Amino acid sequence: MKKLATFGTVLLVALASTAAFCQSRFERSALEKQKEAAAITHPSHEPLQFGQRRGGVPEDWPQRYDRQHDPENVRLLARLGSRYERLHFYKGFGLAFEMPEIRRSAEMARVMHGLGMKVSLYVGGSMFVETFYRETPAAVSWEQRDQYDRPVPYLVGTQTFRHMPCPNEQGYRDYIKRVLDVGIDTVKADEFFFDNYFLREEPKSCRCQRCIDGFHHWLKKKYPTPETARARFGYPDTDWITVNEWDEFNRPEDVRTVDDPVLQEWIRFRCESLAGQCREFYRHIKSRDPKLVAGFNLKGLYSLNRYWYNAVYHPLFAGDCDFFCFDIEGAAPGLDPRNGALVSEIRSYKMARRLDMACSDGSPGVALAEEMAFNNQKYVEGFGWIGAGYNHYNQGIFSPLAEFFREYNDRYYTATDNVTDVAVLRSWPSMAYSIADCWIAVTLAEQVLIQHRVPFDIIFDEHMHELSRYRAIVLAGQESLSSENVGRLEQFASRGGAVLFTGNTADFNEFRRARRLNPLLGLMGLKEKPKAVTVRKVGSGRLVYVPEIVPGMAITPWERWPLPAAQWVLPANHDQLCQALTENLPGGLSLEAEAPLTTAAEIYRREQSKETIVHFVNYDQDRPLAAFTVRARPQFPGRVKSVTLFSPERDQPLALEFAAEDNVAVFTLPGMNLYSMVVIAQ
C-alpha cells in the first residue's frame, strides 16, 4: 500500500508537471497575477457613507474602504498592469458633506499619477435629500416633479432618500459644473464618469413647470407658423397644447404604439433635454482641458424602447460623449442553456463605433472576448485609447484572455475600422413610436446577421446621408419612414445598392400616419404585399422584399422587454432571410466562415499597418470548435504576404497556409476554444 501511494503521488506530480508544461505563457502569467491579486482591495467608486446609508454592505466595509486608499495597494495595482482606476468622488450628498472623502481620493490620485496611472472620477446623478438639501436649500426647487407635483425618487430598492434633478434646471447644471471644477483642480482627474443621468418612465416623467415651459418653447421653434402647427397638431398655435396625464384608464403600460402627436414630440423633447444636460457637462470639461475624458452610463442597445422609457437616444450624444457602459440586467453575453439563444452586446459595440464612442465593460470569459472582438477604441489626445482591456472594469481580470489582450491591445486593437457590407437602419419614428413590434423585428434581423457573421453596421436617421459606404441596407419592420429617407433609399438602390425590407416597412410616414400606398413597394411596381420573397431591379440596384421575420420560439415579454435577451433565438426563417440578402448583395460578402452559428466574427481594416484583422468568438463554451475554412477579403491593394493566427492558447503566433482566390484569402483556422484573431498582412 505504501508503494502504491508513492506511485500515485509520483503520477499526480507528473500529471501536474505535464499540465504546467502545456500551459501557454498567457495562462502562466494569469496564474502568477492571480496569486498577487489576492492581496488587492480594488477601489470602489462609492464613498464610505453611501454604503452605510443604503445598507447591505459587509461589516468590514469601513476596513476594506480604508485599504483601497493604502499607497501599497495602489502600487500593487500598478505592478499588475493597471493603467487607470475609478475613484469615489461625488455621489450627490453635497460637496461640503463629501469633501473629506474627496480629499482621500485626491491623495490616492496623487499616488496613482506618480505611478503613471490615470484617474477616473465618479459623478452621481441624484440628490440626497437628507444632506444635500441641508447644505444647499435651493436644491429643493431643482427636483423633477411628476404630474401630481410629487418628487421623482431614484428607482432602485428603498432609496427614496435620493431624488432626481430636473435636466432642464440650470441651477443644478451650474452646481455640477462646480463639482467638476473640484475634480479638475483638486483631484487632478483624467476622466469623469457620470452615473444615473436618465429620466424615469411614464408616469414618472418630469412635468415640472420648467419642463412644461421648455416643451412649449421647443415646440414653438420646431413649428413656428400656424401652417406648420396645424399640419402637425390640427391647431394653429402650439401654445394651446397640453401634455396628456395618466390615470387608471389611460395607463402607459398599455401603450403599444404612440400615435398621439403631442406624446410623439414629448418623447423627443425628453431625449433632447437629457442629452442637452449631459452635453453641457461634457463641453464644460473639455473647455477646461480637451485632454480630459468624459463618459455616461447610457447602457447599450437592446430590444426595449429606452427612448420612451428613459429618454436615452444615443445619437444625440454623438460628439459629446467619449464612452458609455452597459451594466443592464438580463443581457449577459453567452448561450442561454434553455434554448440556445445567443445573447451579446454586439449591437451596442456596433452602435458605439458609428457614433465614435467606446464601450466600457468588464465581465470575464465570453464578455471579455466579445469586447476584444467588437469594441471601438477611441483615441483622445493627451489621454490615450479608451475602450481597451485596460478600462476600469477590466483591471481586476487576470485570465489568459486578459493577459493576451494586454499584450496585443496597442498593436492590433487600436486604430481600426470595421468592414461593413451591410447597414441595419433603426429609424427614429419607427423605434420611438413603437413599444414592441419594431423592436422585435429589428432585433431578430440583427440576430441573423450576427450569427451568420455578415459584416454590418447599425445606423440611425442621422446617418442616412452616408449610405454610400454600404452595399446593402436592411430595414426590418421599420414601419415609419419619412419621404425624404424613402428618396435616399431609392437613390441608393438606383446607384447599385441593395435595399432589403420586411413586413410593414414604410407603411407609415414619419408621424406614424398610414400611407395609402407603400412607397417602397411602389418602386417595385407592386400595389400589394407579395406573400413570398420578391426581388425587383431599381436602376442598377435591387429592392428585396421579405414578407415576415418568423420568431424561432414563442415570445414571452419580460417587464419592459418585448423580446427578452434570453429569447434572442434565430428566426425560424433565418436561412431564407440571410439568403435573400447575400444573393442580392453586390460584390458578395467580405467574410465567410464555415463555423457553427454559435460563432460570431468581425473583420477590420488597420490603415497604418495595412492589415486586415478578423476576430472569432465561440459562444458555445461546452463545444470547442473544430478546424474550419475562412474566406476573407483583404482590405488593401497588393498581394497577401502572410496570414497569422493569434490565440491566448498559444505561446507564439502561428503562420497559416493560405491561397489567394479572386482577391480573397482562403485559409483554415485550427480548432479554437473561446477566441482567436487572424491578421492578414499585405
Image (cartoon, helix red, strand yellow):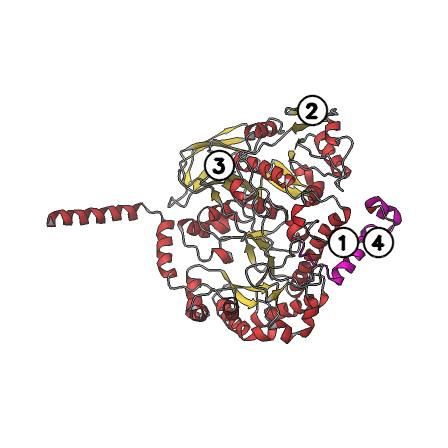
Helix, strand or loop at label 3? It is loop
The residue that label 3 is drawn on is 641
Helix, strand or loop at label 4? It is helix
Circles 1 and 3: CB atoms closer than 8 Å: no
Give residue 536's mark: 2
Residue 340 placed where, x, y %? 47, 38
Quick one: 510 or 581, which is closer to the camera?
Answer: 510
Prevailing SS of the magenta stretch: helix
Give residue 240's mark: 4
The residue that label 1 is drawn on is 243
Q: Nearer the viewer, mark 3 or mark 2?
A: 2
Alpha carbon separation for disc pair 1 and 4:
10 Å
Residue 140 placed where, x, y %? 68, 70
Alpha carbon separation for disc pair 2 and 4:
47 Å
Q: Point out the tag, 1 or 3, that comes first from the N-terminus.
A: 1
At label 1, counting other C-alpha atoms closer than 10 Å, the crowd grade (few under 14, some 14-19, many 20 or more) is some
Q: Is residue 163 above or below residue 377?
A: below
Give residue 455's mark: none
At label 2, counting other C-alpha atoms closer than 10 Å, the crowd grade (few under 14, some 14-19, many 20 or more) is some
